[in-house]
Amino acid sequence: MVTLIAKRIASAIPMLLFVSFFVYALVDLVPGDAATALAGDNASAEQIEQTRQALGLDQPLIVRYLDWLGGALTGDLGTSLYSTQSVVQIIAERLPVTLSLTLVTMMIVVAVGLPAGIAAAVQPNSWLDRGLTVFSSVAIAVPPFIVALALVIPLAILSPIFPATGYAKLTDGAGTWLQHLILPAIAIAAISAAELARQTRASLVDVLGRDFIRTTRSKGLLESTIVGRHGLKNAGVPIVTVLGLQVSRVLAGAVTVEFVFALPGLGTLAVSSVFSRDVPVILGIVMVCTVFIVVINVIVDATYGYLNPRVRV
Amino acid sequence: MRPLLEVSDLVKTYPVKRNLLGRVRERTTVTDRVSFTVERGETVGIVGESGAGKSTVGRLALRLIEPDSGSIVFDGRDVLGLSRAELREFRQRAQMIFQDPFSSLDPHMTIREAVGEPLTIHRGLKGMERDAAVTDLLARVGLRADQLDKYPREFSGGQLQRIAIARALATEPDFIVCDEPVAALDVSIQAQVLNLLIDLQRERGLAYVFVSHDLSLVRFLAHRVAVMRKGVIVEMGPTEQVFTDPQHAYTKTLLEAIPDPRAHFLGRRAEAGAVRAASAMVGTAKES
């Protein structure tokens, strides 16, 4: 198991290098650069050139990238082009918001998706099952920011039960913290919960139809034990896979939904940095998210080992 | 004394067509008013072609599937009217051995867990006590204690079927439905498993319902035999009587279809002889 995890982490290193270079090159390809944006609308060509030199943007792409990479390896992701703050500092301020949002969203995804999928699988083709299929199709089709708007209007504006915008720290009290996160979390969770429910239903229906489940019935086990111990454990690998994939989807959803709810997280930071071409910040965000997703994948892989003895060897 | 199991007029149908709203428009009958009894210590064979409803009868008798109508009385109690707790008690006394031993075991459970699970539920055994009981059961079916922590995929078919038998014996049942228990096994291993079943019957007075399409096996094992066709028992009686003096036309056809190994073998030998003679002749012709 330790070897398995070590291997997964080792294989993540080339991936991180590739992602960082890809994003670096991608931002560079976009017409115009930070110097143009920074020098202002009325700047002369000379002034722009000066700014460019000051930022080191006149260097070839590969030189700039290697320079950035050297810093990144020592934990220095550079400084924002627009403020004196270091990228690490800016991200550290925003990260707790996005992490809180991801955490609450994933809790909703699991709390809704898993039981819904199990209930549908236990009674396939029932009204509940059909209802879930219809409901999940709708949830998967609607993008998170539309769900966000649909939630804000009745629950925050017409009857102000939840705040429409803003964020409260966990240190301000768990209740207030949750109150600020619940609507954006539901908006992002809808798609993921629907996908998790569908995957759970599909894999569990398949497993519950297998011969050994009939054996467990003949053993006289309780239905809950059959579904929990024998069903879910055997259906677990695809369920955990989908759950792991939802983490990256939730992070992607955070970009738009944080904007709708004016949450000061990585999503809003990413959007504003893209508009201002603040390359160091964009790279910083991408790298933090990539590392986060790599960690999630390692956890998912470790779970496979628990769920499937064949992976352990 | 009343028989151990009395099955009367069991009917089971399955939906074949549904309309848009999911209402059933057409059903197919799998078993039609099936009735038979099983005495203590007796083996009742159920034979018939594929799709005759043999396995369904076995599963209905254990209430692993619910019949549409009919009654099942086990040791004087109405099985269909049992409460949840009573049903668990019934499951302890009436077990099943399935055709495919590999798919009938949970691939994620070691043999210790698979055989131990019924011991915990029905006999409340845990830890060392449970392990000792599992080891005993495995020894009874000829498996070693050092194989306890292996998974089903690490065993051969014959070993798995013996594990399945150990699992079925774990609850100390009076009655076992054996659904084609040796159909998936090699002939040499079939004999081992069948002898084990016979030994266990002698030792513990077990009653079996032995479902099989293999008539010679049923003749070897069963005291009485029921012949099924299209969901109906067409003939039932003591095994020797049914095999030597079949009453129903279908039973006769079924018995005629048993290949006579001797005739088959002699036929093949004659054929081989003829081929050899012919090739020898061709050989001589070529030489000349």
Image (cartoon, grey):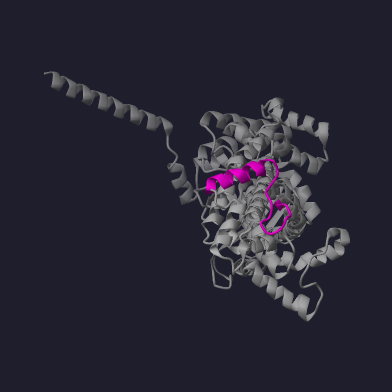
Answer whether residue A153 is visible to the viewer in this image: yes
Q: B24 and A274: which one is in front?
A: A274
In the figure, is residue B14 to the left or right of A147? left
Identify the residue at image location x=54%, y=41%.
B241
Q: Check the image and report above or below for A194 versus B241.
A: below
Q: Is residue B227 magenta?
A: no
Q: B139 and A194: which one is in front?
A: A194
Q: Check the image and report above or below for B266 versus A191.
A: above
Q: Which residues are magenta?
A: A60-87
* Location of the C terminus of chain A (image quadrant): top right
Q: Position of residue A294 (x, y in %)?
A: 65, 46
Identify the residue at image location x=82%, y=74%.
A161
Corner quadrant of residue B101: top right
Q: Check the image and report above or below for B228 versus B265.
A: below
In the figure, is residue A170 to the left or right of A55? right
Q: Position of residue A65 (x, y in %)?
A: 58, 46
Corner quadrant of residue B135: top right
Q: Position of residue B143 (x, y in %)?
A: 67, 27
Q: Check the image and report above or below for B43 versus A148.
A: above
Return the residue found at the far bottom: A158
Q: Is residue A69 magenta?
A: yes
Corner quadrant of residue A174: bottom right
Answer whether residue A193 is visible to the viewer in this image: no
Q: B208 and A217: which one is in front?
A: A217
